[in-house]
Image (cartoon, helix red, strand yellow):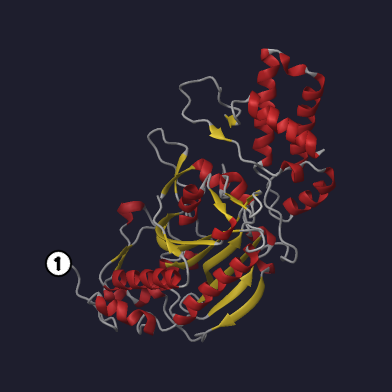
Amino acid sequence: MRRLYQLAFRNRNLKLGLARRFTSTEASTSEESSTPPTLRPDLNFEFLLDEKNREAIKENILHRKGVGDIDKVHEKWSVIQKMMSSGEKTSDINEQKYAQLWNELYDEAILIPNMTKDGVPRGGEKNARKVSEWGEKREDDCLTAEKLVQSWRSLLHPTDASGQRSYVFLGALASLEKALLDYAHERVCALGFRPITVPDIVSEEVTQACGVMQRSDHPIQYTLGGGETHTKLSGTAEMGIAAFLRGRTFLEEQLPIRLVSLSRCFRTEISKSASEAKLYRVHEFSKVEMFVVSTEEQSEAELDYIVEVQKGTFQALGVHCRQLEMPSEELGASASRKFDIEAWMPGRKQYGEVSSASNCTDFQARRLGIKYKTADGTTKYTHTCNGTALASTRTLISDKKGLGELPECLRKRVKQRGAPLRFQPAKPLA
């Protein structure tokens, strides 16, 4: 069977222009198509098309919100096999049909999510497993962070800028946000991550390779206009880093590679309740993101290391948090395992996610062509992990001291910017 796959895919590459594809709605001969041809990802068809794995894949899809259909993948492959064995694809018409079938096979296979790691809780968010908890939890009545800073005149919501979820930090809050981001970025760099600045505009091809599947009922990415319909605003620096790493092959001794980026993030968020209004769920914010490229053997340890970095950051900030292992429905398409850190937001009387970390195994690497060579010359796909070091807006509304007294790790940074160590009401702008 493995030999059949190899022959089939080698034949596909030769016949279909070195593995370049168009979607089923586009003609591959059109010079006016707005979508450029793209390289097919090297999906693990040996695993996906092995009948012995079919039921396990179906069960995995069922536990991950039911996105993807492995039966359709097998159906497309069966038709392709028949055409290959019968010699039916000799005419120009059948050659087009053959190419179309390969497109359809990939369109179905790309939707199959990563396999969930053994031991991960099944089901929805309520089935998350608490791993650890730290910090003092403030239970007394408290205003929301947004109400607490009204007297500072430092938080504005200019709806004419970008709608109900726009915000402006002025003076004290702008200084505090900058101090938070600087602290997180410097701390992560000191712990062995190499800084990188990447674009906030990426192709849909890259976002899909990272596991972001666009939905017709509610698009989850902002799309550029002016004919750039396949170009997106990045939801996280993970995407820009992934684009930078695409097609690269490393030496095994270079791994793990740890990268960190400070960027703007863009989300088409929808509030589920009144408590998610204002700074909790916004359309754009700043974030420090960690990204790791590793071998298969290293990836679980790298995921644990990312989580330890996250925990240390929030412990130093004095924020009460809990670490959760997230259940299967909360993993997204790319992750095999995911941990969230939720901070207690005293004014809202609830926990809110402030950080997450995922092991994506070879899901992203196969779609992006990120590989490494072993000592004996064998080429393998890497594993990738990612995690949020700090997202500014949600961290700001998680301060247990009501944004009044700064933790030690921020005091020096705020003072250097000329802001007071204890923030006082400010005069309005003239």
Q: Above or below — where is 339 with respect to 66?
A: below
Residue 20 at x, y percent in the picture: 58, 30
Q: Is residue 289 above or below residue 317?
A: above
Label 1 element class: loop
Q: Which residue shows up at 68% across the image and 64% down it?
A: 327
Q: Tell me if mark 1 has few (under 14), some (14-19) or many (20+) residues whose alpha carbon lies within 10 angstroms of its own.
A: few
Instruction: Say what amino acid the circle numbered 1 marks.
Output: Ala
Q: Is residue 188 above or below residue 196?
A: below
Which residue occupies the extreme top position in the image?
A: 91
Q: Is residue 357 visible?
A: yes
**Residue in the picture at 41% in, 41% down:** 224
The residue closer to the viewer here, 98 or 64, is 98
Q: Which residue is mark 1?
A: 430
Depth order, front residue of 63/145: 63
Nearest to the observer: residue 58 or residue 66: 58
The x and y percentages for residue 330 are 63, 60
